[in-house]
Image (cartoon, rainbow, N blue to C red):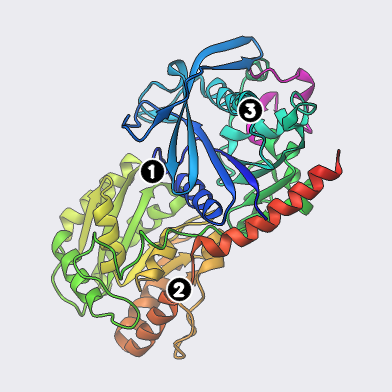
Amino acid sequence: MKMKILMIASECAPFSKVGGLADMVSSLSKQFAESGCEVKVFTPFYSSIKRTAKFKKNLAPLSVHMGLGIEEFAAVWSANLGKAEVLLVEFNRFFDRAGIYNYNGVSFDDNGGRFAFLCRSAMDWCLASGWYPDVVHCHDWPAGLIPVYLNTTLRNSPLGRSASIFTIHNLQHQGIFDRGVLEYAGISMREFRQDSCESMGMLNMLKGGLYNATKITTVSPTYAKEIRTSEYGCGLDGVLRFRAADLIGILNGIDVKEWNPASDKLIPANYDVSSPDGKAVCKAALQERMGLKNDPKIPVFGVVSRLYDQKGLDLLARIAQPLVDNMSIQIAVLGSGEPWLEGAFKSLTAANPGKIGSYIGYDNELSHLIEAGSDFFLMPSRFEPCGLNQMYSMRYGTLPIVRSTGGLADTVSQYVEGTGQGDGFLFDSATCDALYNTIGWACSTWYDRPSDILSLRRNAMNKDFSWEVSAKSYEQVYKWAIESRTAAF
């Protein structure tokens, strides 16, 4: 089915990126464009994006019809993303600043207006150009007003027949602002009600998207179930139970060209499941880079993560000392985040030379080296909508140790001791004891059952996490949404 697809997103790799949302938007767009669909991605042209010759400027300026008047002098630029086209809206008042959502950890106080403008400018570009998508795919709260526009202000326009898909990447982030943002957006205050955009007296842009979207997806099947409960629903579990028939969990894929140990140019030796010797070379390089004792017999437990409570790295920080005191293991950490956690890993590194190594910040080359050179990968997340690093790890033959939640539960298969079945180690409780015991289980397997480790590696490296698999599920959801929307006219 050759569809016209419009992606609306606040991030799109490689142009702008804060997290996995950017990768998903980019990869899914390229996958559908490769299959013959006409795909466009509409996103801000942040000042942090380097202007190069690859960007072409639309000659006519875009007038954006906001509720308090027309915003003039917006410019739309285009660039190629594989066979897809990226449209970047340039509007200095909103996007000419350092940071995407915040600067130095402080959120911009006009974020509601900024992303209301993104939504309306995307719709006005379609109307001005005469390009009307079959599906508008909206990503997280910054695109939350798109389904509201399509159901209200633009219902009787040529865009009214476009189906809307709303993808929840992380339900914690909801886009909560003063109701005045709705007026600026040009959406009737009739939508400021409990079964649309209102939440506890405030505008909730994500909630508006959930109530008005034709179909809703999230980034793993387990997370789709979890967010319908009070524990994970972040106050919107009732809305999601109400829309349960239209909520589908689809596991994210990964870029199997960038994350491929057989061709990765950022690691010192390439390898694959049939010729795995290069992994030992990568391990030695990692041990040297992180100041760990160079010993192939000691298992290395790697971490590449934001250092926040959600990721469960506070649990690791609390048990790291007894781990290296009581077990013959090494720990390599790459990440940044909460100052106390950064300080904790710096202190642990200083106190345990040769056993614990850390790099506070981000280094893309080092992230690839940790994935390739580690024997185990730690992701003790309290919740994880999808997660990508556990999939990168398995592709590199690095066995994940994860909490059984969200996408982690959907991608990692539990090791069955003594059989060689499975491809990782899972635990249920977000506690220090559970993490400590699971690392101990992995450690004993390393030393006592090395043949099982080899089997688990083969199982992990043979898994298919390509976007081709996920895109087939999205294609079905797109078809359902189009049929549903068309039936309404």
Check if residue 8 falls in the magenta segment: no
Q: Residue under label 1, please give it.
A: 14
Check disc 3 and report its element: helix, strand or loop: helix
Which marked residue is nearer to the observer: mark 1 or mark 2? Answer: 1
Q: Which residue is mark 2?
A: 425
Give the Cα separation between the discs numbered 1 and 2: 32 Å
Badge 1 vs badge 2, beta-carbon distance below 8 Å: no
- Location of residue 14 by image quarter: top left
Res 319 → quadrant = bottom left
Tell me which residue sits at (43%, 41%) in the image: 80
Where residue 278 appears, x then y in whole percent? 23, 75
The residue where tag 3 is placed is: 123
Please state the extent of the stretch shown in magenta in the rendering.
184-206
Percent across and percent down for residue 161 are 77, 37
Lower position in the chain sequence, tag 1 or tag 2: 1
Q: Residue 187 versus residue 283: which sits nearer the camera?
A: 187
